[in-house]
């Protein structure tokens, strides 16, 4: 009876398309409006210019990856169509969506040509029925095929957003139609919960591109299929990720928990696949915007809190052996496969969904911690490769090649969140603009209510400089007061704000500081952050880690001979670690020399600087014992 119910839903929604024009697109059609508007809106990347740590990481990725990768190697598997059970299908779309975001931030003729070439070469591989796949005929829409086609659709939709070329959108639409024709509740079609390795999590993550495609195509059949995917989550054989999230079931317990073992296989026998699971919730967030179904939002919000409370480690990410393992309480394990980079990227993307939907600063806090630690540390210095995992102690290791290609899921995925970050430094809301992250930067923002504001932030690095000076460089087309919101990070316990040189006042942390006034050119807001080092303590082992600003610090063998020895940190009268000196260093973010109780000093570096020879010469430790 449940199958019939879902079939009825699918047919009812699909029937709305009767008589509709095949190529009626939302950008031409009148009257299409999402049911839910975001509380915060991404800045257009071309409106933002960065010149700090994140920009330097983006430039590495551009040089070593986006502007250098062999595009033909990404397209070749689609031409050969020889796969049976691997995930070559995902690599083109991951690279393309990263490159499209990179182009939006740093446009160039060379990158535009590469994007056009990558699109055109992919479309040459499409079958007459619209299928774009790397799989042999008898294996199509099994194993990882639908998972990979999700990324094909995301890439094509991204190209349409860049170019407005309806031929690209039509190619995405044909790919969707080929999937709808073979998967669904009707008799004789494939069951989406039975065609992947993870009980519907991988295949079910196709919800996101179908929701995005509906926003562009306004095709009711596309929306019907998106609703079918969401309803399939809750069928008897589905992963039930909506009801489990609403019941506040810890994500590690949503599926088979890993055995409590001390060896290198810890986490391997769990079934709560972190990356794929979060990808499904991203799709629910997009479907919520379209439908207004509050249950979808409540599930996404609940799981985001669930993951943060139970899984996110000191480095801002989670997972072991790619699974949820109750990671917050497992950080005492010296384990090689902590924090898959795909998980870090998808956690940042999930938090960006919640930041946009709710406007709550805590999601920007979580993005910042993941980005400044687990994410950028995983990128090799030349930008040409990434680590698969971000361990807390040990040696950083290059990601292995996947699927008999010079490529890896995390190498393809890391840039997707890195290139997303410029859209969130400055955002807009209905009453004004919001500043989430502080690095040397400029913005020229079009506000939701009309008019523009130009702003710039002076040099701040959280290593040697603790004050962000935000200057209003120009205001146009705005009469009267409007609001600027400044995120005060949760980690900054004692923060002061000064306006136009007036006496500073202390403001609470972990929220936005809101100022509504008649802003004009020459106004300046100075925010002094609390950069005193602080300690995070592991609740199980009692070991500690040093943090300062958004960074976690580590002892690296190159700079600290006693990196693997206990360190009895001397504490100041303020209850914070006593530090001797903070130093700049060529090629590094900086050094932090921390005093010990015996009068000696230990040298720490920010986590992204640790392990950067990617061999035993830069072995490092985040967690250490005091005695």
Image (cartoon, rainbow, N blue to C red):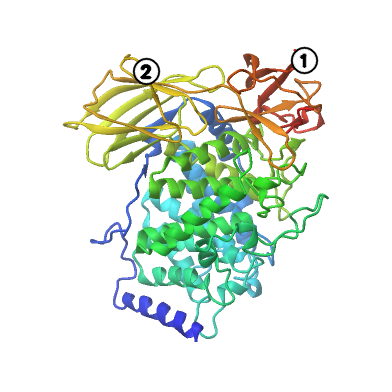
Judging by the rendered image, the residue that carries numbered circle 2 is: 504
At numbered mark 2, what does the secondary structure look like: helix, strand or loop? loop
Give the total number of marks visible in the rendering: 2
Q: Is residue 65 visible?
A: yes
Judging by the rendered image, the residue that carries numbered circle 1 is: 598
Q: Residue pushed farthest right? A: 263
Q: Residue pushed farthest front? A: 573
Q: Nearer the viewer, mark 2 or mark 1?
A: 1
Q: Which corner quadrant holds the C terminus? A: top right
Q: What is the quadrant of residue 623 in the picture?
A: top right
Q: What is the quadrant of residue 313 in the picture?
A: top right
At numbered mark 1, what does the secondary structure look like: helix, strand or loop? loop
Q: Position of residue 617 (x, y in %)?
A: 80, 27
Q: Is residue 107 visible?
A: no
In the rendered structure, the answer to whether residue 321 lies left or right of residue 248 reads right
344 vs 403, nearest the viewer: 344
Q: Earlier in the sequence, mark 2 or mark 1?
A: 2
Q: Is residue 113 above or below residue 507?
A: below
- Answer few, some or many: residues within 10 Å of disc 2's Cα (few below 14, many 20 plus, some between 14 and 19): some
Question: Residue at 71% across / 19% down in the picture?
Answer: 603
Q: Position of residue 12 (x, y in %)?
A: 36, 80
Question: Residue at 45% across / 32% down in the picture?
Answer: 509
361 vs 575, nearest the viewer: 575
In the rendered structure, the answer to whether residue 235 lies left or right of residue 311 reads left
Q: Distance between the Cα atoms at labels 2 and 1?
A: 38 Å
- Answer few, some or many: residues within 10 Å of disc 1's Cα (few below 14, many 20 plus, some between 14 and 19): few
536 vs 10, nearest the viewer: 536
Q: Position of residue 171 (x, y in %)?
A: 45, 62
Question: Residue at 27% across / 38% down in the picture?
Answer: 447
Q: Position of residue 45 (x, y in %)?
A: 40, 37
């Amino acid at each position: 009876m449940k199958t019939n119910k879902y079939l009825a839903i699918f047919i009812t929604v699909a029937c709305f398309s009767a008589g509709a024009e095949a190529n009626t697109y939302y950008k031409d059609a009148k009257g299409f409006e999402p049911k839910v508007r975001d509380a915060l809106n991404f800045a257009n990347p071309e409106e933002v210019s960065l010149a700090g740590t994140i920009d330097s990481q983006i430039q590495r990725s551009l040089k070593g990856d986006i502007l250098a990768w062999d595009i033909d190697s990404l397209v070749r598997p689609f031409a050969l169509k020889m796969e049976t059970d691997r995930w070559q299908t995902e690599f083109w779309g991951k690279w393309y969506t990263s490159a499209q975001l990179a182009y939006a931030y740093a446009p160039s003729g060379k990158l535009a040509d590469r994007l056009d070439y990558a699109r055109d070469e992919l479309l040459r591989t499409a079958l007459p029925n619209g299928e774009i796949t790397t799989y042999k005929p008898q294996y199509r829409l099994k194993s990882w095929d639908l998972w990979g086609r999700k990324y094909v659709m995301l890439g094509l939709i991204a190209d349409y957003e860049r170019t407005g070329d309806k031929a690209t959108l039509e190619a995405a639409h044909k790919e969707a139609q080929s999937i709808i024709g073979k998967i669904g509740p009707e008799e004789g079609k494939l069951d989406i919960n039975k065609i992947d390795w993870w009980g519907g999590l991988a295949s079910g993550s196709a919800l996101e591109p179908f929701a995005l495609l509906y926003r562009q195509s306004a095709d009711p059949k596309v929306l019907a299929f998106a609703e079918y995917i969401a309803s399939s989550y809750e069928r008897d054989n589905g992963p039930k990720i909506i009801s489990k999230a609403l019941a506040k079931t810890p994500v590690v317990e949503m599926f088979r928990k890993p055995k409590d073992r001390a060896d290198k296989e810890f986490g391997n026998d769990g079934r709560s696949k972190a990356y794929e699971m979060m990808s499904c919730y991203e799709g629910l967030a997009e479907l919520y915007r379209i439908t207004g179904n509050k249950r979808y939002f409540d599930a996404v919000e609940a799981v985001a809190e669930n993951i943060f409370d139970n899984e996110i480690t000191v480095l801002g990410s989670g997972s072991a052996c790619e699974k949820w393992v109750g990671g917050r309480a497992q950080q005492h394990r010296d384990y090689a496969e902590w924090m898959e980079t795909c998980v870090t990227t998808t956690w940042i993307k999930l938090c960006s969904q919640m930041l946009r939907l709710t406007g709550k600063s805590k999601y920007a806090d979580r993005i910042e911690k993941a980005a400044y630690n687990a994410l950028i540390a995983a990128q090799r210095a030349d930008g040409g490769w990434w680590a698969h995992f971000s361990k807390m102690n040990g040696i950083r290791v290059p990601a292995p090649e996947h699927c008999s290609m010079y490529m890896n899921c995390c190498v393809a995925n890391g840039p997707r969140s890195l290139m997303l970050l410029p859209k969130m430094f400055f955002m807009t809301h209905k009453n004004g603009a919001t500043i989430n992250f502080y690095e040397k930067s400029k913005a020229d923002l079009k506000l939701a209510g009309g008019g523009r504001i130009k702003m710039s932030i002076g040099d701040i690095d959280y290593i040697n400089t603790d004050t962000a000076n935000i200057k209003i460089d120009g205001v146009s087309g705005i009469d009267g007061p409007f609001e600027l919101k400044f995120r005060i990070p949760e980690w900054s316990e004692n923060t002061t704000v000064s306006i136009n040189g007036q006496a500073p006042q202390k403001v609470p942390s972990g929220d936005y500081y809101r100022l509504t006034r008649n802003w004009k050119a020459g106004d300046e807001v100075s925010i002094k952050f609390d950069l005193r080092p602080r300690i995070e303590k592991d609740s199980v082992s009692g070991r500690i880690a040093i943090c300062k600003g958004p960074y976690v610090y580590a002892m690296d063998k190159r700079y600290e001979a006693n990196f693997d020895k206990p360190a009895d940190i001397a504490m100041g009268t303020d209850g914070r670690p006593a530090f001797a000196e903070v130093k700049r260093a060529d090629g590094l973010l900086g050094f932090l020399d921390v005093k010990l109780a015996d009068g000696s000093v230990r040298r720490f570096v920010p986590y992204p600087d640790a392990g950067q020879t990617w061999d035993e010469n830069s072995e490092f430790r985040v967690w250490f014992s005091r005695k």
